[in-house]
Amino acid sequence: MSRDDQGSWLFLLFNLPAKHASDRVKVWRRLKKFGAIQLKTSTYVLPDEPAHYERFQWLAKEIVDNGGEAALVRVKDIEGMPNAAVVAMFNDARARDYDEIAEPLTLRIKDTKGRKASPEIFTGRLQRLRHRFQEIYEIDFFQSSRGQQVGRLFQQAESLESNKRGSERKERLRTEDYQGKTWITRPHPEIDRVGSAWLIRNYIDPKAKFVFAKTMDRQEGALPYDMIDSEFSRHSARCTFETLIERFGIRERAVVRLAEVIHDADLEDDKFHRVEGFGINQLLKGWAKQGISDEEILVRGFQCLDGLHAQFKR
């Protein structure tokens, strides 16, 4: 959201009795998670968007149900405070959030000795910091400059992680060599197979044709993926989706976030602490049990991933 796009603001004004201290803490935590900023005591503001309006509505109802008072107000202009000043307050708040991870991230980058001695620890700590960065990024409504700076730090850290794995990496593949192919995978596709097909169709081979078989010899000349002993499959604790983005050098941020979602839902190791994929995976399994064809499951799965990808690009 740019400063010029901002048309109005949402105000949540509330009051909870002093004896409800625990409820006050819960409300404060929810507001912090929403990315709201405080203008005055018990007055919080968010950009006027449907999702924010719904969050404030539900929170206002909870406050009232707990014996408090709450009002939700839409404001076009704030007297004595131009929109640019409000945007600056949001950016300052996000900068403080980003600073919480910038210091430990910088220390990880500078700790060459520790990184070489314990690469697994470096990777694990980097993943936790990256997860927190993504949480902040989702409420960084005006793309603050501090967020961009920390993003560059992550690129630097990830390049160090990449160098560590350099000897394990295979040669990067060119999408030009994989056009108009037939891709084969196992029947009853679940989230990794559906996600990989979505990735192939959108980022590797726009005219890809997908077929399903239990063994690779059913379709001569087809490229297997997510099948035993195939190049494009699970490797080194990575799901097939991650293998594909690694081999083809796909680095779009929204796609990398999708990879985390699919990884956690497929491998169930909670590596990235992403939960969005579990519901999608249950839908895919349910459609298979209903007898929906593999081709139709792909179509429906693509629609789910299109929506999630669009949200990640927001």
Image (cartoon, rainbow, N blue to C red):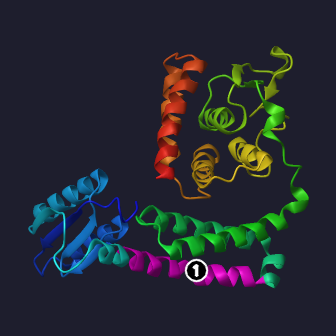
The residue depicted at 69 percent of the width and 35 percent of the height is 200
Q: Which residue is mark 1?
A: 102
Give the percent coordinates (x, y) of residue 126. 66, 70
Left or right, residue 289 beside residue 180: left
User: Relative to the observer, which residue lies in front, 240 or 92?
Assistant: 92
User: Relative to the observer, which residue lies in front, 155 or 61?
Assistant: 155
Left or right, residue 18 beside residue 114: left
The magenta segment is 90-111
Q: Quadrant of the N terminus?
A: bottom left
Give the percent coordinates (x, y) of residue 39. 23, 79
Q: How many neighbours does mark 1 have within 10 angstroms: few (below 14), some (14-19), or many (20 or more)?
A: many
In the rendered image, the vertical position of residue 314 relative to residue 293, given as above or below: below
Counting every numbered tag in the picture gives 1
The residue depicted at 18 percent of the width and 82 percent of the height is 41
**Main SS class of the magenta portion in the image:** helix
Secondary structure type for disc 1: helix
The residue depicted at 79 percent of the width and 28 percent of the height is 224
Left or right, residue 137 beside residue 232: left
In the rendered image, the vertical position of residue 289 relative to residue 37, given as above or below: above
Quadrant in the rendering for residue 85: bottom left
Asked if residue 143 lies in the magenta stretch, the reply is: no
